[in-house]
Image (tube, helix red, strand yellow):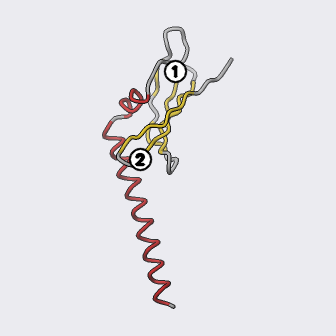
Amino acid sequence: MTVSYLSFRVPYSANRDCVIVIKPQREAYQAVCVDAATRRTIGSPSLRRDTNGGRPQVSAADVIGRIGSYRLASAAVDLETDELADRSRRISSQLRSRRRL
């Protein structure tokens, strides 16, 4: 049996991209959407097999639609918040080290 994966890279917010990989499972196909920068999974909807049992004809927009705009917005906010906190910690650390000199 040949295993085939299909992958897309698509923006899901203003400055965030996700990589969508569609892989076969036993009864259906699984579309996994992962944030391109952090590699965190955003969503993974199941897709029904095509009428002949093969890979479904699906676009990136279809997968994004199945994940849902609220989930995508929530993931973008969570990731941006984490990055902002990391930047704030780095800047605070740099300022503390400069004061010691």
Does residue 84 appear to the left or right of 22 in the view shown? Answer: left
Select label 1 or label 2 by which is in front.
Answer: 2
Name the residue located 49 percent from the left edge and 9 percent from the top edge: 51
Q: Which image quarter holds the N terminus?
A: top right
Which residue type carries mark 2?
Arg
Q: Which residue is mark 2?
A: 16
Q: Rate crowding at label 2 as few (under 14), some (14 to 19) or many (20 or more) other CA atoms within 10 Å.
A: some
Q: Relative to residue 13, is residue 68 depicted above or below?
A: above
Residue 89 placement (x, y as % from top left): 44, 71
Q: Relative to residue 39, is residue 94 depicted above or below?
A: below
Does residue 18 appear to the left or right of 13 in the view shown? Answer: right
Mark 1–mark 2 CB contact (< 8 Å):
no
Residue 10 placement (x, y as % from top left): 44, 37
Residue 30 placement (x, y as % from top left): 51, 28
Q: Which residue is mark 1?
A: 28
> How far is mark 1 from mark 2, CA to CA?
28 Å
The residue nearer to you, when weighing 17 against 43, is: 17
Q: Earlier in the sequence, mark 1 or mark 2?
A: 2
Give the secondary structure at mark 1. Answer: strand
Q: Rate crowding at label 1 as few (under 14), some (14 to 19) or many (20 or more) other CA atoms within 10 Å.
A: some
Which residue type carries mark 1?
Ala
Give the secondary structure at mark 2. Answer: strand
Name the residue located 61 percent from the left edge and 24 percent from the top edge: 4
Name the residue located 38 percent from the left edge and 47 percent from the top edge: 75
Most distant residue in the top direction: 52
The residue nearer to you, when weighing 99 against 53, is: 99
Residue 59 placement (x, y as % from top left): 44, 25
Name the quadrant containing residue 61.
top left
Name the residue located 58 percent from the left edge and 21 percent from the top edge: 26
